[in-house]
């Protein structure tokens, strides 16, 4: 099968590309390399031969539609996005251009290519707004009330997917992702606290914790997320499925775990809580279990250990 992965040089996308190639698929990667890196695809490029084709292309460019019509992927994994919530607040037009107009280009390309299905990376952390503690872990049936332009753009793309399914019989599955972490995550962005902690710990730098550190997130390991994407290629048609662990993990717990694993003395710096930050977050994953046959298998300790080992290897 020919698959196209937008954002395929990024953190999650490159791990997905590796999995698809191992399973024998031909893969086209579309990436503008604004945040992705060719180094993330080094192993794939070395081993895939003609099964991997990389296109340096922005999804907002009209040429992406022409490319897809020419390459005719049977399956599209759409992960390319402007993913920084703070940028979406300060530059909402830019956010909408990438996440909405860019996604429409991908849907138009899929329509012209007669693609069978689009699997979309939605955002479980922003889609549901700020659920009350009683609503946690939050289910897909919860009202979609994003509180940032980034979340609004992700919700809009889900609405377009529904419309394209009705108008053009283009099947989709949208995965509302928790806080994904793992090897290849950028430690220099505003998200990715596990990668940020690993980089600071192993460099001997102080680790900054915003607020009291008791804010929780649903941390899910990248290999588990990739498995959900692969399963969504043939299951869960027309659905939004949460992809997380169903468990709340505090920032303090993450730091304590990584400090023990690193075996080094960590200097902690407490800073004021960031405005607008969610206090608690977790996703109910029963729909993914039923519809995709998916559950996560990587616990926090194994996942953080893998990140520390990856960061140590890159620093070496």
Image: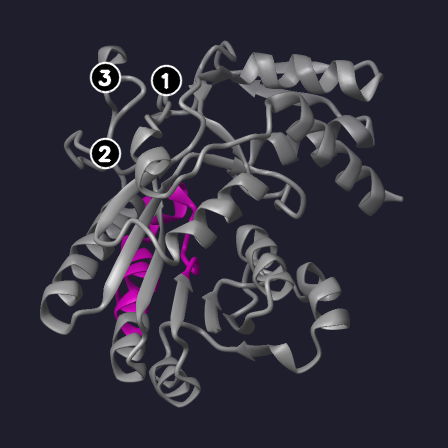
Of pointers 2 and 1, the one earlier in the residue sequence: 2
Q: Which residue is mark 3?
A: 135
Queried whether the magenta region covers residue 263, the answer comes back as no
Q: Residue at x 52, y 48 (%)?
A: 226
Return the x and y of residue 207 as percentages of the image width and height: 67, 22
Residue projecting furthest to the right? 316
The residue that disc 2 covers is: 140
Q: Residue at x 39, y 61 (%)?
A: 78
- Secondary element under disc 1, as helix, strand or loop, is loop
Q: Is residue 257 above or below residue 173?
A: above
- Do the numbered discs 1 and 3 sit on residues whose CB atoms are within 8 Å? no
Residue displayed at 35% across by 30% down = 285
According to the picture, the residue beneath numbered tag 1 turns out to be 280
- Quarter that holds the C terminus: top right
Expressed as whole percent of the image width and height from the top left, the position of residue 62 reads 33, 83
| Quarter assignment of residue 268 | top right
> Distance of mark 2 from mark 3, alpha carbons?
11 Å
Q: Residues within 10 Å of mark 2 (few under 14, many from 20)?
A: some
* Percent coordinates x, y for residue 155 in the rendering: 22, 48
Magenta span: 78-105
- Tell me which secondary structure the magenta stretch mostly adopts: helix
Q: Nearer the viewer, residue 56 or 73?
A: 73
Dot 1 crowding, Cα within 10 Å, few <14, some 14–19, many 20+: many
- Spatial distance from mark 1 to mark 3, Cα to Cα? 11 Å
């Amino acid at each position: 099968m020919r698959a196209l992965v937008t954002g395929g040089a990024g953190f999650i996308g490159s791990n997905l590309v590796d999995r698809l190639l191992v399973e024998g698929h031909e893969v086209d990667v579309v990436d503008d390399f604004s945040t992705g890196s060719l180094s993330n695809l080094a192993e794939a490029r070395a081993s895939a031969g003609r099964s991997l084709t990389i296109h340096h292309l922005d999804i907002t460019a009209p040429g992406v539609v022409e490319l897809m019509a020419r390459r005719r992927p049977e399956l599209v994994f759409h992960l390319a996005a402007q993913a920084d919530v703070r940028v979406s607040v300060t530059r909402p037009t830019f956010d909408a251009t990438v996440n909405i107009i860019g996604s429409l280009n991908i849907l138009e390309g899929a329509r012209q290519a007669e693609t069978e299905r689009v699997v979309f990376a939605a955002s479980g952390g922003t889609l549901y707004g700020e659920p009350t503690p009683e609503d946690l872990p939050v289910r897909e049936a919860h009202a979609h009330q994003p509180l940032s332009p980034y979340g609004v753009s992700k919700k809009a793309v889900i609405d377009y997917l529904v419309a394209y399914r009705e108008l053009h019989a283009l099947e989709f599955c949208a995965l509302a992702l928790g806080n994904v972490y793992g090897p290849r995550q950028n430690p220099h962005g505003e998200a990715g606290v596990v990668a940020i902690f690993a980089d600071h710990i192993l460099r001997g730098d102080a680790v900054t914790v915003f607020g009291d550190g008791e804010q929780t997130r649903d941390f899910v390991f990248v290999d588990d997320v990739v498995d959900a994407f692969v399963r969504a290629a043939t299951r869960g048609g027309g659905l939004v499925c949460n992809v997380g662990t169903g468990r709340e993990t505090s920032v303090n717990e993450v730091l304590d775990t990584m400090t023990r694993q690193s075996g080094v003395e960590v200097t902690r710096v407490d800073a004021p809580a960031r405005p607008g930050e969610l206090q608690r977050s977790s996703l109910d994953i029963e729909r993914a279990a039923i519809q995709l046959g998916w559950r996560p298998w990587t616990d926090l300790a194994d996942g953080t250990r893998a990140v520390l080992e990856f960061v140590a290897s890159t620093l070496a």
